[in-house]
Image (cartoon, rainbow, N blue to C red):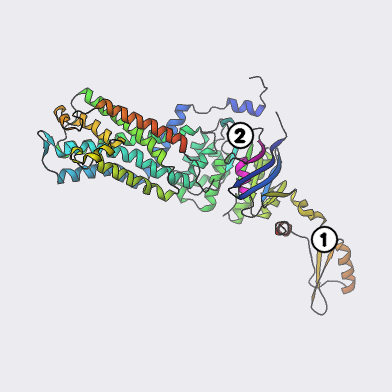
């Protein structure tokens, strides 16, 4: 069956003994979209993703990933999936090039290893043994191994942890390129700016449940949130007012101060503010 | 095919993936490359049996029986020990490390068939075994005039005893790797097993000089039978009279080693874990 949904999960549950990690998650990811899963540590994020990746078995619920049940992963299904793991030095004695070439051999329609190495920015390190790479370079190698099979669906688990700001921007561009080429991407992240920069939709997971799914700009009714206008009074105190019409308020203030308003700021809640509020209420 | 292939699927079908044999050979090459590049494991795995036989030859001077020197007797135990080190100990120690580091998890996330991982290990074990045994024999011939088997039949026996022994030890090494909970505990699990078997199976002592209960316990495990099979290769036929059973019992050697291959395989299939317990 051809389906415009890459992932469908209904009533997904998983417990480890008495500890319920995933308590009924319903999730849909469309083909071609970038979906970010946010949530605090221990919220059930990793368990959910690992069930979708075919690494773990669920206790209950229905799951379909690229029209197959990931609990019984076939090689033909694995051919279409890419997984970027958080690996550290698993193949110390091999070079970047050897490793990427080797993994290319597992896929029916692998990409050109040299091209992939260049794409993740490791061309200068192709002959280096992996144990000589920096933390950020190792993550790029993880990405190279995740995309070498030209996946239709790519899972990224906290992909930019340990990256410097410049490397992160480069990495974001790589993700955008993959998305533009039609790859469906599911990423988990701790960085809200990353979710905002990359994701078409964001799912927030807390306490084993998906508490909201929305576009980053709409999360937690963010677009309707009131702006906060602050300024300094002639007595030197800071005054703040929440306002649905901040421009009107600023105009009024300008009239009152006869021009420049001292210490004026107009802010709207960041994704981080919204997110912290959401998970704080759990 | 009754369904229509989507363009993407059609393109995939056109791509060429290595066949099973090529996959196994590639994996074997990768394993060997990794082994050869970790210098400590090369030196210790290759060097251990050679050092041991040199020590034994220096300590025990003389003959066990007319025409049978001590080194000629102990070479059989050293060959068997070497084979067990390369297969059983090597895998029992390394697989938990690979599991802990996420190597196995990484392979599981690819379309690589599971058996390819084991095939790679087997190829590595076989190649190292051959090189290591050849080195041991070469040193022994050079240093204390070891007499190599003189007939094709003996070489054939050498061959099948080694193949069955390596197979049994490899499978048991893979099986025992699942007992280790962390990367650090692999050698704690494997080393005592190996040492106890070496002391009770006639590697360090003349087997018939051991207490009979110890001989009987050792007879439950493969190492004793590997040593016995190799004695039939390196010792004169007349020496067979000194074996516990009054002969080299090659039929029983084959039977016990084959049984351990089956036991090892069943244990592997039933217990092998691709992830750590922490991973669930």
**Along the line of sight, the residue nearer the viewer: A109 or B103:** B103
Which image quadrant is residue B88 in?
A: top left
Q: Position of residue A160 (x, y in %)?
A: 60, 51
Query: In the structure shown, which secondary structural element does the residue marked by tag 1 occupy?
Result: loop
Separation of disc 2 and disc 1 at Cα?
Answer: 44 Å
Note whether B268 is above or below B250 in the view shown: below
The quarter holding residue A255 reads: bottom right
Q: Residue furthest bottom?
A: A235
Quadrant placement of the C terminus of chain A: bottom right
In the rendered structure, find residue A80 and report the number of the disc placed on it. 2
Q: Which mark is residue A226?
A: 1
How many marks on residues?
2
Q: Chain of mark 1?
A: A
What residue is shown at x 22% (from left), y 26% (from top)?
B154
> Residue at 48% across / 36% down in the picture?
A102
Q: Is residue A138 magenta?
A: no
Q: Is residue A46 left or right of residue A268?
A: left
Tell which of B164 and A167 is nearer to you. B164
């Amino acid at each position: 069956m051809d389906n415009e949904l890459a992932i469908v999960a209904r009533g997904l549950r998983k417990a480890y003994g008495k500890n319920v990690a995933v308590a009924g998650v319903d999730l849909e990811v469309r083909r071609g979209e970038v979906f970010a899963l946010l949530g605090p540590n221990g919220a059930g994020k990793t368990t959910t993703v690992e069930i979708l990746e075919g690494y773990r078995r669920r206790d209950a619920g229905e799951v379909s990933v690229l029209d197959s049940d990931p609990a019984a992963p076939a090689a033909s299904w694995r051919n279409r999936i890419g997984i970027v793991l958080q690996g550290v030095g698993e193949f110390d004695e091999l070079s970047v090039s050897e490793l990427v070439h080797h993994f290319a051999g597992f896929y029916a329609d692998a990409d050109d290893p040299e091209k992939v190495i260049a794409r993740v920015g490791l061309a200068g390190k192709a002959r280096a043994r992996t144990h000589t790479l920096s933390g950020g370079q190792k993550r790029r190698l993880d990405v190279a191994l995740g995309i070498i099979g030209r996946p239709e669906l790519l899972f990224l688990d906290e992909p930019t942890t340990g990256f410097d700001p410049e490397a992160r921007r480069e990495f974001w561009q790589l993700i955008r390129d993959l998305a533009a080429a039609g790859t469906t991407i599911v990423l988990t992240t701790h960085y809200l700016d990353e979710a905002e920069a990359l994701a078409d939709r964001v799912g927030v997971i807390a306490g084993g449940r998906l508490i909201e799914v929305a576009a980053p700009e709409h999360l937690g009714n963010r677009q309707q949130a009131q702006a906060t206008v602050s300024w300094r009074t002639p007595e030197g105190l800071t005054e703040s007012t929440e306002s649905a019409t901040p421009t009107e308020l600023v105009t009024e203030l300008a009239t009152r101060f006869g021009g420049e308003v001292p210490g004026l700021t107009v802010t709207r809640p960041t994704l981080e503010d919204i997110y912290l509020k959401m998970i704080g209420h759990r | 095919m009754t369904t229509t292939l989507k363009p993407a699927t059609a393109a995939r079908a056109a791509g060429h993936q290595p066949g099973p044999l090529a996959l196994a050979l590639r994996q074997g090459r990768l394993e060997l490359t990794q082994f050869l590049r970790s210098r400590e494991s090369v030196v210790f795995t290759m060097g251990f049996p050679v050092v041991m036989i040199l020590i034994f030859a220096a300590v025990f001077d003389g003959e066990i029986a007319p025409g049978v020197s001590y080194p000629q007797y102990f070479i059989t135990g050293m060959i068997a020990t070497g084979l067990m080190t390369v297969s059983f100990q090597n895998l029992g120690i390394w697989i938990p490390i690979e599991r802990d580091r996420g190597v196995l998890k990484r392979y599981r996330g690819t379309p690589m068939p599971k058996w390819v991982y084991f095939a790679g290990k087997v190829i590595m074990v076989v190649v190292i075994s051959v090189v290591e045994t050849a080195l041991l024999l070469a040193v022994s011939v050079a240093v204390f005039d070891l007499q190599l088997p003189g007939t094709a039949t003996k070489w054939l026996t050498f061959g099948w005893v080694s193949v069955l022994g390596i197979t049994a030890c490899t499978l048991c090494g893979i099986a025992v790797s699942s007992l280790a909970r962390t990367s650090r505990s692999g050698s704690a699990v494997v080393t005592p097993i190996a040492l106890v078997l070496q002391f009770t199976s006639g590697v360090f002592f003349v087997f018939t000089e051991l207490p009979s209960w110890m001989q009987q316990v050792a007879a439950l495990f493969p190492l004793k039978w590997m040593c016995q099979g190799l004695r039939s290769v390196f010792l004169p036929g007349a020496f067979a009279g000194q074996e516990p059973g009054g002969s080299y019992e090659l039929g029983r050697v084959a039977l016990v080693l084959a049984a351990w291959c089956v036991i090892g395989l069943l244990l592997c299939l039933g217990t092998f874990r691709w992830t750590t317990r922490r991973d669930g």
